[in-house]
Image (cartoon, rainbow, N blue to C red):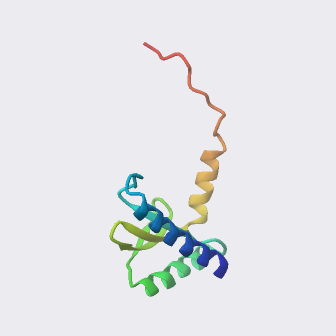
């Protein structure tokens, strides 16, 4: 994990220096950096978000309809967001995605 963390921080610094040196390069109005919980039960993943929120001093946002449990901190337009997605929400997404490519729109628009 340390190697990935170091690479992200170094990359962010290099990107900031690059954008500072190239004011002609367009940028978005915001820049999120996401951390998704990986392993464990839904309770384990929620606990990870709880721990991150405690370190950040940020509130928890629980969206049970979407199956997302998040916390975030912003530095101007830059945001760090930690997200846990419930097992049920991942299963719903996988089921919906299983139809990807099976239905093709009619290439001729109807009039």
Question: Picture coordinates of residue 35 (x, y %)?
Answer: 54, 70
Identity of the residue furthest to the left in this view: 76
Q: Dividing the picture into quarters, in which one does residue 85 lie? A: bottom right
Residue 89 visible somewhere in the drawing: yes
Seen at 44% across and 86% down, the residue is 54
Identity of the residue furthest to the front in this view: 21
Q: Dividing the picture into quarters, in which one does residue 5 lie? A: bottom right
Q: Quadrant of the N terminus?
A: bottom right
For residue 4, above or below residue 57:
above
Report the front residue among 72 and 3.
3
For residue 104, above or below residue 58:
above
Question: Picture coordinates of residue 38 (x, y %)?
Answer: 64, 71
Seen at 47% across and 59% down, the residue is 66
Report the front residue among 59 and 56.
56
Report the front residue among 101 and 96.
101
Residue 83 visible somewhere in the drawing: no
Q: As drawn, is 105 to the left or to the right of 40?
A: left
Question: Picture coordinates of residue 67 (x, y %)?
Answer: 51, 63
Question: Picture coordinates of residue 19 (x, y %)?
Answer: 43, 61
Seen at 65% across and 35% down, the residue is 101
For residue 108, above or below residue 101:
above
Label total for image: 0
Q: Quadrant of the C terminus?
A: top left
Report the front residue among 82 and 96.
82
């Amino acid at each position: 994990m340390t190697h990935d963390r170091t690479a992200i921080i170094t990359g962010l610094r290099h990107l900031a220096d690059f954008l500072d040196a190239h004011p002609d390069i367009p940028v978005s109005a915001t820049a999120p950096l996401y951390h998704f919980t990986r392993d464990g039960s839904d309770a384990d993943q929620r606990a990870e978000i709880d721990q991150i929120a405690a370190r950040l001093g940020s509130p928890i946002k629980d969206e049970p309809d979407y199956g997302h449990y998040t916390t975030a901190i912003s530095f101007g337009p830059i945001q760090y967001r930690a997200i846990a997605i419930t097992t049920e929400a991942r299963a719903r997404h996988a089921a919906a995605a299983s139809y990807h490519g099976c239905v093709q729109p009619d290439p001729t628009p109807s009039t």
